[in-house]
Amino acid sequence: MVLSYLRSHLPLAPEEFVQAVAAQLTSDEQLANIAKHLGVDVLVRTAEQPPSSTSIADAFRALFAVIGEQRAKVLVVDVIIPQLIDIDFAEVFPLRQPLAVLTDLLEKDGAKEIEPRLLRSAGVVSAQPVYV
């Protein structure tokens, strides 16, 4: 559900980026953190005490399976998708060669020749220069 939501709301984003963000949102650590805030860790009874992140995340996934598809979609939109604000996209999908990624995207849109240019710069001698 998270992957389909991201695909529909980020139609121009590369598929690898969408999959990386969805994997981050549905990771055991992220789901366990959300579940703890909702009190799922208090409800889970396991042999391990306190329950591990994997157990809490699995219990949260089981909750999604039980509540039905429509309610699960609402829960995804209301609880999981807002966690996007905490995700550092540079860590989730690092661009080692941003020009190559941009070239691929522009070629998919029909661009024939791509020429990198430096249009503006600011703060060249500062600690954080900006180049556009």
Image (spheres, rainbow, N blue to C red):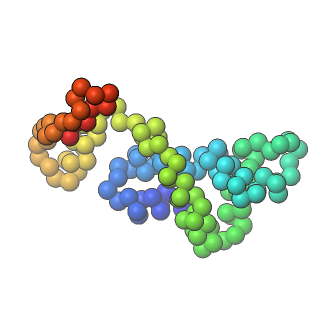
Query: What residue appears at the point 16 percent right and 53 percent down from the top-left corner?
Result: 110
Q: Position of residue 104 (x, y in %)?
A: 25, 43
Task: Write down the quadrant of residue 54 in the picture.
Answer: top right
Visible residue check, residue 72: yes
Q: Where in the figure is residue 61, as x and y percent of width and height?
A: 68, 56
* Quarter of the image with the N terminus in it: bottom right
Residue drawn at (71%, 59%) of the image: 38
Specify the farthest residue to the bottom. 70
Residue lying at 42% horizontally and 39% vertically, measured from the top left: 90
User: Which quadrant would the C terminus be assigned to in this image?
Assistant: top left
Q: Residue furthest right?
A: 47
* Relative horizontal placement of residue 81, taking residue 61 as reference (left or right): left
Q: Nearer the viewer, residue 46 or 130?
A: 130
Q: Is residue 67 left or right of residue 84?
A: right
Count all numbered tags in the image, as a single digit: 0
Q: Position of residue 94 (x, y in %)?
A: 40, 36
x%, y% of residue 114?
14, 41
Q: What residue do we see at 70% from left, 55% from top?
A: 37
- Image position of 25 with respect to 72: above or below: above
Q: Is residue 22 visible?
A: no
